[in-house]
Image: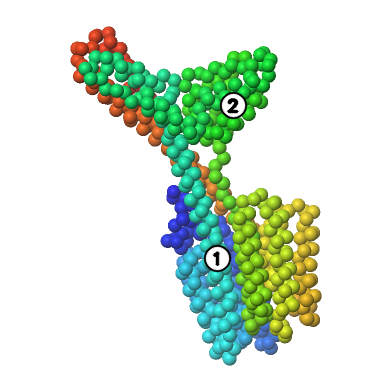
Amino acid sequence: MTTGGAAGADAARDDLALSRLMPRVAKAFPLRMLLSFKLVTRLFEAMVALQTGHGWPLALAALGCGVLDCVLAPLLSGPGRRIVPRVALDTLDVTLWSLALPGSGDVVVIAASPAITEAGLWYGARGLVPPVLVGGAATAAQAAGGHFTLLTLLWPGFAALGGRLIRSYLLARWREEARLMRHHIEAAVSQAELAGQNSVAMGADSVVDLLVRTAPLIARYEPAPVPGPFSGWKAALAEACGRQSTYLGVALLRWQSAYNSRSPDLSTDVELRITPGAGTLLLSPAQARRLEADLDAMGPRGTVTVDAPHLGPPGQRQEVLVDGRTVVVPADPRPGTWPVTAAPIAFIGGAMIVLCQSVPAWEAVPLWLTGPLALANMAAAWWAHRNAGRDRRDLARRVIPVALLLGALQSVVTSLAMRVGSGRLPFEFFLHWVVPLVYVHARDLRRSRLPLVALGLAAAVGAGALAMPPFPAAGAVIGLCWFAPPLLTIMGVRDILDQDVADMHAQRLRIHDEAVRAGFRRGRLLVVELTTEAVDQLKDRYRALGNAVPRQMGEEIERRLEEAGTMLATAAAE
């Protein structure tokens, strides 16, 4: 399969496979992420410049960099070779700002997060180079200013890890879907090949039947007759087809018997008369059940003629004429594509964020507290992944309460256990992952439940704030700005991703249908080739008899062999 699924299967050898699987997302997501993280970082750089006494010139320089980011973003965002100049510019950017704002390296380095995340997302293992470059440059610049810290390596590392995890998750899912699709196509093609053979060999007065009747006429005059394999081959073919599908004739007789036994009133009985050849149409078990239900709804009486104008592969759309009325038997459902949901990715992000709160220079929450919280988030990510195939409304009703509960636990526990005097607001950290998750899935809830979700968010923030020592309200308001970048990044991405997934699914279905049609034709051509060889052999045997065959019998044999050749030519052309 040279499809999106195959691209996912070959992703280990193809850095940009993911961007080709999601062309719309690859175009829209990087631009939104770049602008949201860059602009918020510029705002905080300006605030830090004012708070540390550097004055308005440096603050205006930060805002000017934000304007420049807006100009360059459309030119530099997205997968491809542009990632190299982006990483170079971001390395220069964080180096200069780390020198200009000593002690704020862990803030300015966030400006490089979009490029680092994208490198991990699109380029796999090679995406680990940018965080080393950016983090190393920022750390060296901070050390030159007398503020050596390894925190400048933390955010680049987490950004790269996040991109890498998202890449691995999406590609693993699509590889599994591609594997299942291949198995389904192989089974459907095998069934279609049998159906193709059946359509030539089992029709009314088929060419095989003609040869079965002709071979004894030649064998009668041969000293050592050659046994014909056709009757045994037809029986084996019928048995093989019957194991995977149902003949129309069998399904109709079964329905007729069940229908007539429902009432002792003989006037309601029905007798189905199947036109020659129509009874060999193959139906899948689901199609046979659907046809029986349609016949129940029609309620025919008396003698009814049933015909099948075209013999196609089982599982495909079929038409059956019942007493002149067309009954459409729909095609069987094809394998679907699981929707990509935000919940597993958000829960994994929550695990990473809560582990950050154990960094000694920040909240320094004991690892024995953040570790179980992170494990709970990872378990929730796995659970959300396993439930991704559910109806979206049902999924939203499940994942949002779980996210609010885990977010509230993170808010309260980290606020109670934080390092005294850290000056940080840990009760707001969970908003970085809960708010995007809620934003994506809340649209699937009834409007009457949205106030409850908002109340749950407020309660989680409030509970954590109450567990905190006194803190300035202004700082809490400013801290809320940090959850804006992830929210702005994913706005609208769900709809775009749904379009990419729908396109991929449509492409897989086209390949499925083309493979089934090709298999059906191969089955027909196989019987045509085998039967053509049999006709040639009968002709050779007939010619070898010479004058041993009476004239009238010879004319009949020649007529039948000529008719078989015409039937084979027609079958090969169809």
The image position of residue 177, as x and y in percent, is 52, 51
Q: Amino acid at mark 2?
A: Val
Indicate left or right for 259 with 90 as reference: right
Q: Nearer the viewer, residue 160 or 291?
A: 291
Point out which mark residue 327 bears: 2
The residue drawn where x is 53% and y is 21% is: 307
Where is residue 315 shown, x and y percent of the image?
52, 35
Compared across the picture, whether 212 is left or right of 499 comes to left
Local crowd at mark 1 within 10 Å, few (<14), some, or many (≥20)? Answer: some
Which comes sooner in the sequence, label 1 or label 2? 1
Please say if the residues under marks 1 and 2 sit with CB atoms less than 8 Å apart.
Answer: no
Image side of residue 57 versus residue 251, left or right: right
Vertical placement of residue 125 versus 492, above or below = below
Q: Which residue is mark 1?
A: 165
Q: Is residue 66 visible?
A: no
Which quadrant would the C terminus be assigned to in this image? top left
Q: Amino acid at mark 1?
A: Leu
Residue at 67% over, 54% down: 395
Q: Position of residue 154 (x, y in %)?
A: 58, 77
Q: Of helix, strand and loop, which one carries label 2?
A: strand
At x 77%, y 57%, the residue is 450
Q: Residue at x 68, y 16 (%)?
A: 264
Q: Is residue 428 above or below residue 553?
A: below
Q: Label 2: few (<14), some or many (≥20) within 10 Å? A: some
Q: Quadrant of residue 90?
A: bottom right
Q: Which SS class for mark 1?
A: helix
Instruction: Determine which quarter of the picture holds residue 522.
Output: top left
Q: Which mark is residue 86?
A: none
C-alpha gap between disc 1 and disc 2 = 50 Å
Total residue callouts: 2
